[in-house]
Amino acid sequence: MRSTTILYKGIPAGILSQLANGSFHFRYIESWLDDKKMPAISLTLPKSKKEFKSPHLFPVFFHLLPEGANKQAVCKFKKIDPADHFGILINTAQFDTSGAITIQPSMS
C-alpha cells in the first residue's frame, strides 16, 4: 500500500492510499472534519467520516497530473511507468499545482 497526505491550501485535509490491488481510498483526517470552516476538497468528495473508494484515481487528483510532453519527461527522468498515476502524482503535485490541492508524500 502507498499513501500520501492531501493538503488543501497547505493544511492537511486527508489521506489518499493505493492498495495492492490498485484501488484507491480517500478519507478526511479528524481535525479537518471537526473544523466547520474547512470545506470539502471536491464536490465529489464531500466532508464525511466515511472512506471513499474507487478502482481508479479520483478525478480531483487525476487532474493534477501532467500531460503530454511534460508527463513523458517526468516519467523518463523519475523512471515511472506512465500508467502509474499514483507514482506520478507523488512526484509532481507537491508544490506548484493549478489549484488549492497539493500532496505531502508519506515518509514510509
Image: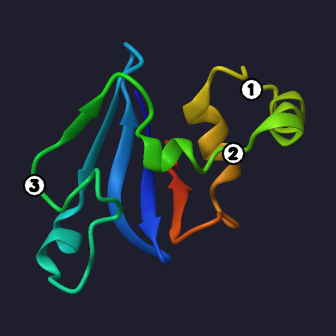
Q: CA distance from mark 3 to mark 2?
A: 28 Å
Q: Which residue is mark 2?
A: 91
Q: Which residue is mark 1?
A: 80
CB under 8 Å between discs 2 and 1: yes
Question: Residue 36, image x and y in percent?
Answer: 15, 83
Mark with earlier residue (3, 2): 3
Question: Residue 74, image x and y in percent?
Answer: 83, 38
At numbered mark 2, what does the secondary structure look like: helix, strand or loop? helix
The residue furthest bottom is 37
Say which quarter of the image contains residue 35.
bottom left
The residue furthest front is 43
Q: Residue at x 45, y 42 (%)?
A: 59
At numbered mark 1, what does the secondary structure look like: helix, strand or loop? loop
Q: Residue at x 29, y 58 (%)?
A: 43
Q: Residue at x 27, y 67 (%)?
A: 40
Q: Which residue is mark 3?
A: 49
Kind of residue at badge 1: Ile
Mark with earlier residue (3, 1): 3
Kind of residue at badge 2: Asn
CB under 8 Å between discs 3 and 2: no
Asked if 89 appears above or below 46 in the picture, the reply is: above
Asked if 98 appears above or below 5 in the picture, the reply is: below
